[in-house]
Amino acid sequence: MKEILAEVADLDARDPLAPFRDEFRLRDGLIYVDGNSLGALPKATAARLAATVTEEWGEGLITSWLGADWVGAPQRIGNKIAALLGAKAGEVIAADSTSVNIFKAVTAAASLRPDRAVILSETTNFPTDVYMMQGIEAFSGGRLKSVTVDPADVLGRLDEDVAVLLLTQVHYKSGLIRDMAEVTRRAHEKGVLIVWDLSHSAGAIEVDLNGAKADFAVGCGYKFLNGGPGAPAFLFAAERHHDAMPVLSGWFGHASPFTFEEDYRAAAGVTRFLCGTPPVLGLTALECGIDLMARADMRELRKKSVRLGQLFIERMTARCGEFGFELASPADPELRGSQISYAHPHGYEMVQALKERGVIGDFRAPDILRFGLTPLYLRYADVVEAVERLRDICVTRAWDKPEYRVRAAVT
């Protein structure tokens, strides 16, 4: 142990991202490996929210829509997100939830392929993506058809019937990275438009939407972007698709909301994909997370993420190899996002026992332990210690308690 502790101490000492850890609120002794589910709180966020509440809202009241530029927040923050995703200013807005933005993006894409009826995805996609597809089928009266196939069969299913392909770039359970450029190319060869879900990509891996010629994309703000619980999501629409008409035609997507016209006229550009009044407090918190992320070098983030992942796997093999864990993430770091997942029959109980010992990861049914690797605040020493605490609960069977078997509403 002395050798590995010395090794990770050296890695942490030389880590160019190390100063960022001090900008997050993390209690002593806690090892937080769940930033792929909810990012940690940037210290600046609390102060910024307090100012928004007490000064902008408390003192400025309604004048802050202009004076504090609340009204411009979706576009302003969207432009900052665009810079992280290889998109241009004016192609991204911050708004609503990922689920709502999936509805907006998929229906917009489908409207651009009126002679096609199939919305295609994979069977293991994140459930909300598929649920929204099913809802769109029902909403369309059955004109549009929701179809899911085995992940290995997705590209082979692309044909002249498919209007839209909806895929997640980084899989929520395994962390498997899909080749965005290649999949998009294959879709376009068949005349299919593609909507990418970047919920586990944004802020975790390098993304180049325009380089890949992506059509639409969505993603959430509360994971690696550290925007806070329930933070607004984002929607990307490539400039060439800005004539697509939104189905959710809310007043903030109108060309002139405050003329209060009787009929809807879509705003120019990506603004037409706004719907209702912007959630100012949520956007304020999200902007703090984005501003922090924008100061980091994405290449350094990815480099550290890969090293953290390799270290985690090496330590699991060395220290927990006899306890029945099965690696559920790709072994090849080039194919893996910023998380490590393991399958175990008692995964749920183990995650609960780890929380009692100051290691917060999460669980995904039926048997997956997920460990998010957030390079801005996770240290190499944290990885070593997390695995040691996991080994301890395995050796002592501390996970084998009745209370740990009771499934909570959130896992």
Image: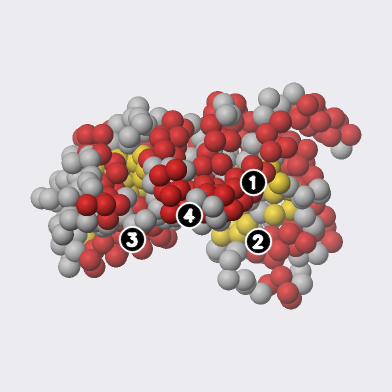
Judge the density around disc 4: few (<14), some (14-19), many (≥20) Cα neighbours within 10 Å. few
Amino acid identity at mark 4: Leu
Q: In terms of secondary structure, where does tag 4 sit?
A: helix
Secondary structure category for the residue under label 3: helix
Q: For numbered disc 1, what is the local secondary structure?
A: helix
For image coordinates 18% across by 41% down, the residue present is 243
Amino acid type of the residue tagged 1 in the rendering: Ala
Q: Residue at x 58, y 29 (%)?
A: 296
* Spatial CA span between label 2 and label 4: 49 Å
Q: Say if 51 sits above or below 187 in the image.
A: below
Looking at the rendered image, the disc whose residue lies closer to the viewer, 3 or 2, is 3
Number of residues whose C-alpha sits closer than 10 Å to that of mark 2, classed few (under 14), some (14–19) or many (20 or more): many
State the residue position of label 2. 347
The residues tagged by marks 1 and 3 sit, at their Cα atoms, a distance apart of 36 Å
Residue under label 3, please give it: 132
Q: Which of the two labelled residues, at mark 2 and mark 4, occupies the earlier sequence position?
A: 4
The answer to whether residue 264 of the structure is visible from this angle is yes
Name the mark on residue 47. Answer: 1
Q: Which residue is mark 4?
A: 61
